[in-house]
Image (spheres, grey):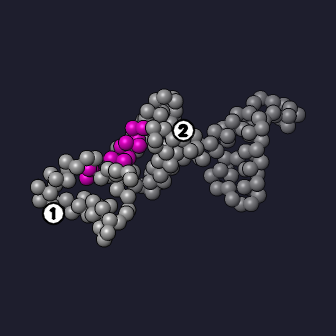
Amino acid sequence: HKNYSYNEIPDLMIGDFNPAKWASRQRLRKSELSQKQINALSILKDWTWSPRFDRFETNFKVLQRWSASNGKSNVPSKTKFEGIDLDTFIQRQRKRYGLGLLDSEQILKFESLPGWIWDPLEANWTENFLAVKILSEKNLSDEDRGLIFYPQKLKGWISQQRTMYTKGKITDVRRNLL
């Protein structure tokens, strides 16, 4: 039987009593609680008035330590570090960013990480596009231009862009760049 802290109470029932819902109600009605009730809750081990904020801060600090030890913030898929699923944490924060749900302080925190990217798919597309552009703009004669050696990765990317274009699934911006 695990002892849960008050900021991670599972949704379980003890008879007719649900501790998670009770704790949530106490947080929501903090302004209605007496000082004695607030003090009683505040001295509970691991009690927090804002579990989401605290969880964000804890996870972000772990991400900072991972980034510092790896020199980057691009976390490989399914990376767990210090017990935190960093990949899932990052995906959620990127989604929240896209929905406008991160505050400016949180945005600045992420942007302070080495190599932070909000949209890795867009960054990857731009990186591949620029590599193809550099290779194709080399001063080559018309006859040598058809002999440009593209690394296998770029050949696949070029093929994918052609397929997307043929199917009409490429954005106007990208089509104009290509």
Q: Residue at x 41, y 43 (%)?
A: 59
Query: How crowded is the residue under tag 1: few (<14 C-alpha within 10 Å), some, or many (20+)?
Result: few
> How many numbered dots are placed on residues in this image?
2
**Which of labels 1 and 2 is toward the front?**
1
Q: Is residue 46 magenta?
A: no
Q: Residue at x 27, y 50 (%)?
A: 48
Give the residue at x 43% y 33%. 65
> Is disc 2 placed on a helix, strand or loop?
loop
Which residue is located at x 31 percent, y 71 percent?
Answer: 16
| Labels 1 & 2 near each other (Cβ < 8 A) | no
Decide which of tag 1 and tag 2 comes sooner along the chain.
1
Q: Is residue 170 above or below residue 61?
A: below
Q: Nearer the viewer, residue 131 or 71?
A: 71
Q: Which residue is mark 2?
A: 74
Quadrant in the picture for residue 61 = top left
Magenta-highlighted residues: 47-62
Q: Amino acid at mark 1?
A: Glu
49 is within the stretch colored magenta: yes
Near-viewer residue (165 or 52): 52
Q: Amino acid at mark 2?
A: Asn
Residue 41: x and y, percent? Answer: 20, 53
Q: Nearer the viewer, residue 8 or 144?
A: 8
- Looking at the rendered structure, the secondary structure element under dot 1 is helix
Determine the image quadrant of residue 108.
top left
Q: Which residue is mark 1?
A: 32
